[in-house]
Image (spheres, rainbow, N blue to C red):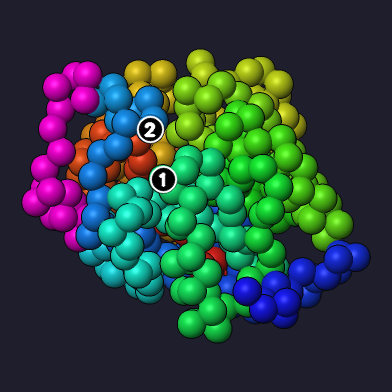
Amino acid sequence: MRDDFFRRNNQGDTSRLDHWSMDSEYGELQDVLIGPMDYYSWQTGNAMSRRSIRLGREFDKQSAQQQYQEMLDVYQHCGIKTHILEADENLPYQIYARDSSVLTPWGPIITQMYSPWRRGEWVAVSKFYQENNIPVYEAVTAGAFEGGDFMVLEPGIILCGYTGERTSEAGLKQVRSWVEKEGWEFKSYQFDPYFLHLDVKFAMLSEKLAAVCTQAVEDELLDWLKSRGIEIIDISYRSVLELGVNVVALGSNRVLIPKASTELVGKAKAHGLEVYQPDMSMFTSGGGGVHCMCQPLSRKDA
């Protein structure tokens, strides 16, 4: 990879990008990167897929293809441009495009996957950014760091979860050093590896409004969120087991929530949000929801 591939200024003060950037999880989504489903199948490398198999559920490729298209139709309906990663037959979980890179105000960061059978995902995402002339901020080289743990909470603040596995302390420390040099606050939160990533139990829905499974997080995080003036919609532990909090804020008080997440759908509507509800059961049963499947490429500033 060329030395000039990364645009990060070692001393900080890296300039903001005009388009390929975001400063929050809820700014109006303009472009989104989606993983391909060509070679997708359930793998047993996470607790969610093992639970599905244990409960007797079966993967149906045709149903998965229909659900995938239903999700893409929502993005199209909302005027959001979708980009699809090039498929690799050796990467069955490449569909979860959230993990192989993350977007910052200064451009994307290419991450470092924890599982051996996902480590090759950096190739396609790096190629995508290069071929589309999207400037890359940096790439993680220390430990492991996966995108499902990284949240651009709101302007000036990054919230990052870590379990010591999918995101390790070394990876967290490296990314923290970059963010803090840019003058942003970096809040870290440690939790149990059972939950895979932070986006399994936490999501921003709109400005100052978050969905959180309070039974699965400590008071320390809840108190910190409340200190930021963020209202919390409490979602049950049972719903989290079905990835009921793994959702995408589309901006302008619109949110993409899987059809089966009836608890959050009802509470989001009660808060005045416009909800889109595709059936995503073939994907949530495999360990990832709509948030896992999308990597924002551009959001309007909050």
Q: Quadrant of residue 85?
A: bottom left
Q: Vertical placement of 195 versus 257: above or below?
A: above
CB atoms at circles 2 and 1 under 8 Å apart? yes
How far from the left and from the top, in percent, is residue 60?
A: 11, 43
- For disc 2, the marked residue is 45
Secondary structure beneath disc 1? helix
Residue occupying the point 21% across, 41% down: 282
Q: Of the residues shown, which amino acid type is indicated by label 1?
A: Trp
Q: Residue at x 34, y 36 (%)?
A: 287
Q: CA distance from mark 2 to mark 1?
A: 9 Å
- Which element is circle 2 on? loop
Location of the C terminus by quadrant is bottom right
Quarter of the figure with residue 136: bottom right
Q: Is residue 19 above or below residue 223?
A: below
Q: Is residue 78 visible?
A: no
Frontmost residue, 186 versus 92: 92
Magenta-drawn stretch contains 244? no
Task: Please determine whether, in this image, residue 128 is positioned above or below residue 172.
Answer: below
Position above or below: 301 against 195: below
What is the magenta segment's predominant secondary structure?
A: helix
Q: Which residues are magenta?
A: 53-69
